Image: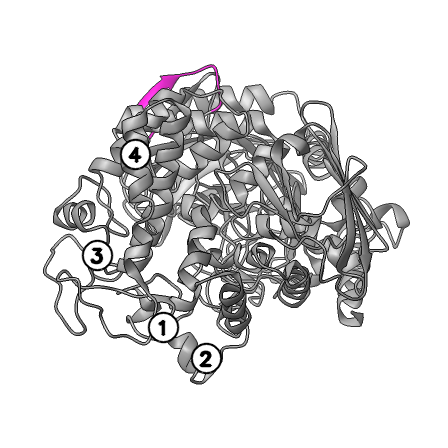
Amino acid sequence: MSLIFNRTITSKLKIAFSAALLFGQGIAMAQTNQYEGTGNLKYVDPIIGNVGQLLEPTRPTVQLPNQMIRMFAQRPDYMSDQISSFPLNVVSHRMGQVFSIKPTVKDIEASDWNKKMTYDHDLEINRPWYYTTWLIDEEIKVEFTPGKKTGIFKFEYPENSEKGLLLGVYNGGEHEYKSISKREISGIETYNGNIKVYMYGAFNTDVVLGGLKDGKAIVANSVDEKDLKAWVRFPKNAPKNIEFKYAISYVSAEQAKKNFDNELKNSTFEQQVKKGEEAWSKVINQIKTVGGTEAQKRSFYTALYRCYERMIDITEDGQYYSGYDKQVHKTTRPFYVDDWSWDTYLAHHPLRTILNPEQEGDMMNSYVNMYTQSGWVPTFPLLFGDNPCMNGFHSSITFLDAYRKGIKSFDVNKAYEGMLKNANEATMLPWKNGPKGELEDFYYEKGYFPSLKKDEKETVTNVHSWEKRQAVAVTLGHSYDDWAVAQMAKELGKDQDYTKFIARSSNYKNLWDSKTQMFLPKDKDGNWVDIDPKFDGGMGGRDYYDENNGWTYLWQVQQDVKGLIGLFGGAKSFENKLDQLYREPLGRSKYENWAKFPDATGMVGQFSMGNEPSFHIPYLFNYTASPWKTQKRIRFLLDTWFKDNVFGIPGDEDGGGMTAFVVFSSMGFYPVTPGIPVYTIGSPVFQNVTIELSNGKKFQLIANNCSVVNKYIQSAKFNGQVLNTPWFTHEQLVAGGKLELEMGAKPNKTWGVSK
């Protein structure tokens, strides 16, 4: 705890020290809190998790909640002391940027577009709505604040220096920078091969736009060389502080200018900073907490901040560009993109059904529009269209979950049509889009996705060469997806569809091996493929599983936990296997295990906290005679793997996918089965959690005597009535329910025991 506390203090001192140096106003208390924000905003620290365990770190994203413009200084992770560039926009959470910008104090002909800029971590401030850093070699202070479709950079140059900006692009294809007037420029960059992204920008001083050709600076009204090296030079009498306001559009150059006028024409940098703080204050302070440690609050509220990185609204003046039919559409509702449903269906979308059901409805409406425009419901919808990643059609689960929680502001029948088409006609192959083939027909007939025999060469050309068949993971994932189709069919009175898909939802049982008590692969002849479920299957176990081994996929039956318990022969055997999960050794060195399973981080025995399929597993003890074990495990996992420092995320956070688990679990409850509007109770880290609901009511969870030690539930009440089960409904929550727990240091082994 002392280390965590010191990290908190260090962060506050860093802000104070940075303010003193960067603003030149001495060490003043006002500067200490200048960018702290109101209420719980002071606990948000975007650098938490900026060094990944093995794979991707979090990014200190600066943006407005769920809005298009996102910016973070380009560097490998927080360990680096160099910045390669500043993007005007991060188009996708992890799939590309547009329009790079770098300040320079050298003459343009002597400038190096590839040179990285050195900075000092302690002279950097990262807030969700404001960023500043000090470039040591150039002695330039950089500031940034975002709008919805706009941003503002400020550059403070040293006295008597050259003043310029180096402009570039991140993508190949058509690109251009163009001078419009003495103070205005425009730009075009081609993203993902064929999407034109338009930029309009204005300076607070006269500028000269030019390019570098054959090592010589050329002045031109338009710079569109193949290897673009554009620059902006400021006159000798330019102010020390250069301000660059800009807007981005996916629709047109004219719309970029309109976006600028709508947001920035009459707004200053300071006003935009204030607007950003207010926008973040609204969403962060929607959940109020009492109690918990400073470290727990920092981890919790930073996790909540990450849940607003995506999806993003790309509508512009009642229109949007769609990558699903390559057209511009008129609309009266927001159109959202940038979602990874394999990650987000578990906790991220369910969290939004509580915090902002209207927005979740708009997102579901966006999915429906994507289906009508492209012919398929997407899996990873990005700006350019569906990015075929991972496996499964988990958007079907998200549709069902929203519908059953009363969110019906989308064309439900059209959504069901898309769910049905995906289930009947789309390829189930991982990392592939398009119509079904022979493996899908096999699945429909035999009830499982066939695996290759060991060392058998692939016979189906459409199988991804790296991602393989993932035969067990695909069977389990589509069993859940088919369950969602069946349940939606039931809701809509489509009895024949219900009968068909509820049967298919039990396909997971076809890969159950009662001898090993594992889900194991079968070949096309129905024979078991003899494997070590801990380690076989190539990189990430992808021949059979996906990013994780058989111990993780043992529990991927959220839609039918009772059926899974039945396969184990009863709740006691199920509980024993859960216990074993956390104690089962790797069977090899850590470095050997991680060389093959780099996604399986945050290990506790064979449990992998660092990957999404594990999120619900610690809550499965609530289906046994020992709910206290859920309370024990959740607290241990939160305290062990989600620290409030740069290493504080155990795996790929995926823009809210993982941190939604932290938000739910820290509050004390979790949606084990999205699609069933019920929550199960864990162990809250706070004494009081209050959620301001959009219907004007409040949900309150009180944990009397809650502390780091007092993590076990002794008794419970809901709305004053004794509660002896670790479950409550979404309906109870949104009605403004009050869950009251009595906490203690030792488990009450009789409370909440499932009957």
Whether residue 328 is in magenta: the answer is yes
- Dominant secondary structure (helix, strand or loop) of the stretch shown in magenta: loop
| Residue type pointed to by label 3 | His
- Find residue 499 and name its label: 4
Q: Of residues 723 and 223, which is closer to you in this image?
A: 723
**16 over 382 or under it: above or below:** below
> Can you say which quadrant of the picture contains the N terminus?
bottom right
Q: CA distance from mark 3 to mark 2?
A: 28 Å
Disc nearest the viewer among 3 and 2: 2
| Residue contact between numbered discs 2 and 1, judged by CB atoms under 8 Å | no
- Find residue 464 and name its label: 3
Disc nearest the viewer among 2 and 1: 1
Q: Earlier in the sequence, mark 2 or mark 1?
A: 1
Q: Of residues 98 and 607, which is closer to you in this image?
A: 607
Identify the element where label 1 is drawn. loop
| Residue type pointed to by label 2 | Leu
Q: CA distance from mark 2 to mark 4?
A: 41 Å
Q: Which residue is mark 1?
A: 516
Magenta residues (range) = 322-334
Q: Earlier in the sequence, mark 3 or mark 4?
A: 3
Residue plotted at (52% across, 35% down): 207
Residue 321, image quadrant: top left
Q: Earlier in the sequence, mark 1 or mark 4?
A: 4
Q: CA distance from mark 1 to mark 4?
A: 31 Å
| Residue 68 shown left or right of residue 236 in the figure | left
Q: Of residues 278 and 455, which is closer to you in this image?
A: 455
Q: CA distance from mark 3 to mark 4?
A: 32 Å
- Find residue 586 and name its label: 2
Disc nearest the viewer among 3 and 1: 1
> In the rendering, at what x and y percent does residue 117 appear?
54, 60
Q: Earlier in the sequence, mark 3 or mark 1?
A: 3
